[in-house]
Amino acid sequence: MLYCSNMDDNNIDNIEEKLKNIEDWNEDWNRERANIKPILEIAIDCHNKARREAGWKNYEKASEFFKQAIENYRNALKLNPKYYLQDVIERVDFVIDEYVNNMFNFKGSSDRLRTENGVKEFMEFTQGLSADEIKYIDQYELAMRYFKIADIYFQDGDSDRAYEFFNKVADMQSNRPFLNRDTYLRIGEILYSKRKFKEALVSFVSVLSFDRGNAGAVIHLDRCLKELKIFEHRFKFLSATPNEAKKLIMEVL
């Protein structure tokens, strides 16, 4: 037993108990480390390989390594770690984030989105994501993929499918004015081609709400007003918000 003339027996017992607890903790930690370290080393190696392949845009190969990393991190969690738990949880969050974005980049690549099957697979992927997984996707990047799909359909003359995807972009209410401007301009052009002049007019007003000097929107707006025979209200529509334009249409028609 340790001895010090200034300590009573209770204090000495407390110190010895604390020392024993530290020894037990070290043994427990070393035991956990010995069990979990080999699994984590494999997981980290796969994770690093996945990142390297993703950086080279080898998304399919990266996906294989991400899956292996995730599986090994899961195996680590099955050991019910106490000391490594927070570290493993953080690593799992990182690898899932990167895996989801890797698949997003793969499914949403330009070449794949140019085919009908590629669009189908992209939509199945994004719609199949859980609420926890979708949070990893940058919503601006998702909106841009929808816009790319819509624009391809638009250029190919498939106005119905283009309209569908342009509306997906609009529904996301991006905080990027240029994206909203271009989206509503395309929507307006499609509606105008279908002779839906009132709806087209509101779309062109929406364009101007993001870009007051947009000459293309003004030209199309004027055409809508002439078709609807309400050109005398031109200046009101030019300065209106989309909601004001809807009300104004009901008032003047």
Image: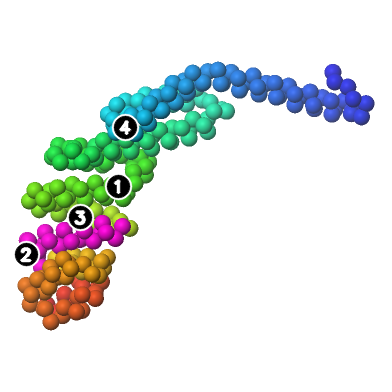
Sooner in the amino-acid sequence: mark 2 or mark 3: 3
Q: Looking at numbered disc 4 in the image, what kind of residue is underneath it?
A: Trp
Residue 145 in percent (x, y) is at: 24, 46
**Mark 4 sits on what residue?**
56
Regarding mark 1 in the picture, which secondary structure is present there?
Answer: helix
Using the image, determine if residue 37 lies above or below residue 170: above
Residue 48 in percent (x, y) is at: 41, 28
Q: Are marks 1 and 3 in contact (CB under 8 Å)?
A: no
Majority secondary structure of the magenta segment?
helix
> Which callout, 1 or 3, points to the residue nearer the camera?
1
Q: Looking at numbered disc 1 in the image, what kind of residue is underneath it?
A: Glu
> Which callout, 2 or 1, points to the residue nearer the camera?
1
| Magenta highlight range | 176-197
Mark 1 to mark 3 CA distance (whole Å): 16 Å
Sooner in the amino-acid sequence: mark 1 or mark 3: 1
Regarding mark 2 in the picture, which secondary structure is present there?
Answer: loop
**Mark 3 sits on what residue?**
167
Sooner in the amino-acid sequence: mark 4 or mark 1: 4
Q: Residue at 16%, 50% (x, y): give it.
A: 151
